[in-house]
Structure formats: C-alpha cells, structure tokens
Amino acid sequence: MKAFSGADAYMCHCGAVGCLTTLASNSGLIKNKGMTLDEFAWHVRSGKEEDIALLQKIIAAIGLSLSNVVTFLNPDQVMLTGRVIEQLGDRIIPEVLGIVQQTVPQTCQNISLHPFNNDYDEAALAGQLVIKTFFDVPLDILSL
C-alpha cells in the first residue's frame, strides 16, 4: 500500500514509490526534504506552517497504514516506536488514534496505542505485553 501519493510519492530505498519511510523517518526526511528529524521537529514545534502541513500528511499516512493492520489483525494494543515517535509522539499519537478509530470497523475500535522510545528492547517489551495480556484474567469471572 502506498502511504504517500502525488508530489509526496518519493522513491524508497526498497525500489517502491510512496512508502511510509520516505517521509516518516529520519533518513527519508534527509533524502527527500533535506532536513533531519531533529530539524523537522524543531520547525514543527516552532510553528513553521510548511512543516506542520507535512506532519499532517505523515500523521494521515501513519493513521491509514495502521488502520489497515488493525482491521486485518484486530489487536487490542499496538506499540509505536522509533525516532519519529520519540520526537513528535505527543503530536502524532492522539491524531493517529483518532484516524484509526474513525476508519476501522466498530469491532476494532477498542485499540490502545503505546509509545516506546528506543531506550527499551522492543522485542522484550512486546513479549511482556503479550504475556501480561494473555494471563490478565478478570477476577470477577473466577469462581471462588
């Protein structure tokens, strides 16, 4: 699935066009917009309209991409990680959650998004989340 189209559909390192990483990553921003993620985040937080508009396109692309995954797999929780989330997660996650909840079937709308920074071992955290969820039995259903 293309995340970006039209003028925002840049060639990806994988050979496809319009991939999510062409703008929603540090390397994509450097290659296609000539700025680092740090510079982009600073511009967004400083109110630079052009970069705020780009952030909105990135949010929309992440939201729709995640909506497709949620629709097919119907997870209860999704971990989001990476430098983009570390830098701008406070702006991205609430809007992405709104997009996901508006675009998935009603049976998939009870989704939680969890931001994690790269200081953690994502595989270990994912395993812990699965184990916690698997063994999380509501006490009211247990017979005494």
Image: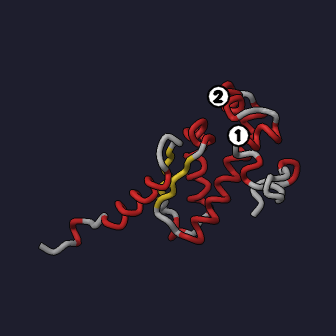
Percent across and percent down for residue 58 are 71, 46
Q: Which residue is mark 1?
A: 26
Nearest the eye: 104 or 61: 61
Residue 34 marker: none
**Could you say which quadrant of the image residue 65 lies in?**
bottom right
Task: Tell me the kind of residue under disc 1.
Answer: Asn
Q: Which residue is mark 2?
A: 45
The CA distance from mark 1 to mark 2 is 17 Å
Closer to the chain start, of discs 1 and 2, is 1
> Looking at the image, which residue sits at the far left?
144
- Above or below: residue 70 compared with residue 113: below
Residue located at (77% from left, 60% from top): 2
**Could you say which quadrant of the image residue 91 lies in?**
top right
Percent across and percent down for residue 74 are 52, 69
Residue located at (84% from left, 50% from top): 10
Task: Tell me the kind of residue under disc 2.
Answer: Arg
